[in-house]
Image: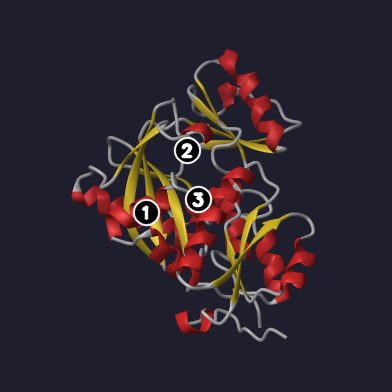
Amino acid sequence: MRLYKRNMVMTKEELKTKKIGVLMGGMSAEREVSLKSGAAVHKALLALGYDAVDIDVDRDIAQVLTREWIDVAFICLHGRYGEDGTIQGLLELTGIPYTGSGVLASALAMHKVFAKLVFSGHDILVAPYRVLRRSEKLDVASLGFGFPLVVKPSQEGSSVGVSIVREDSELDQALELAFHYDAEILVEQYIKGREIQIGILQDQAIGAIEVVPKKEFYDFEAKYTAGMAEHICPVDLPQELYRTALETGLAAHRALGCNGYSRVDLLVTEAGECYVLEVNTLPGMTELSLLPELAQKEAGIGFEELVERILLTAALKTGA
């Protein structure tokens, strides 16, 4: 019987005696990316001398966890059923400590509407937006902002279902795409700015990286296809603005109640405004992923060390 207590973390020596399950794959639109993240993390854990097994998550995951009897879960899932608090809830119920944020923080971060409400309540800057449900019609004139617009599902990651709409003739197709992934979507004011990503590790902002996509914005293809985006690290920002960006990223992480690590996506304007786009509670860990790159270049933390430091944060968040 597992007797881990709430927020109890284990030492490296203790973790070396445990069986680590790397949860990957899953059932979201980001399954293939998750498999790559999980494979990289599993390889790193084995190289570090941990007893690690890879677990492809499907709807039978409860039975698999019982069969495998892992002691700790390293979550490498992306998107629905992995980043949204569902797998975290299962692990809490079964008493298995896990990496990343807890149930509530994961659910809030994944749900862009509620995340924006939390950010606004903490005076964190977000783009003006309107929530649209499938049964509703969009009156652009009533938005309070005009074209260009950003249309996105409320609960998808990796820019799945996201469109930039520059004129009325493009709107219906963008709405149809977003509604394909969610019954509730966001229509946002387009903010022109530099895409700056902030890395958070062990409740500290460890650095920033800028993404310059070859396409109009940093979409799914740009994120996961080599050569489709330029990564600039260190970021060329004035020192004060750089510090503000780090503080904004950490404030967003903390506002949602995140744990362990995250990656916060910002838009930084020419006027020096830092708009929070989203908090990724389980950022990618692939060869093209931003957190490992900025950790190495900004903080001197190599991939294996990053994996181990994340593992060391594993804990139950709501257990007794």
251 lies left or right of 78: left
Three-letter code for the amino acid on which mark 1 is drawn: Thr
Image coordinates for residue 221, horizontal then vertical, percent:
51, 32
Residue on which disc 1 sits: 248
Residue 156 screen position, x and y as percent: 61, 43
Residue at x 59%, y 46% (from the top left corner): 113
On the question of residue 63 being in view, the answer is yes
- 73 or 176, nearer to the observer: 73
Disc 1 to disc 2, how far (Cα)? 23 Å
- Structural crowding at the residue carrying mark 3, measured as other residues with C-alpha within 10 Å and reported as few (<14), some (14–19) or many (≥20): many
| Residue 165, image x, y percentages | 53, 22
Q: Residues within 10 Å of mark 2 (few under 14, many from 20)?
A: many
Camera-side mark, 1 or 2: 2
Cβ–Cβ under 8 Å for marks 3 and 2? yes
- Check the picture and name the quadrant holding the N terminus: bottom right
Q: Amino acid at mark 2?
A: Lys
Query: Which numbered disc, 3 or 2, marks the residue that appears first in the sequence?
Result: 2
Instruction: Name the residue carrying label 2.
Output: 223
Q: Secondary structure at mark 3?
A: loop
Viewer-nearest residue: 300 or 135: 300
According to the picture, the residue beneath numbered tag 3 turns out to be: 284
Under tag 1, what secondary structure? helix
Q: Earlier in the sequence, mark 1 or mark 2?
A: 2
- Closer to us: 285 or 28: 285
Residue 43, image x, y percentages: 51, 60
* Amino acid beneath label 3: Gly
Residue, far top: 169
Q: Is 292 situated above or below 316?
A: above
> Which residue is more in the foreground, 248 or 90?
90
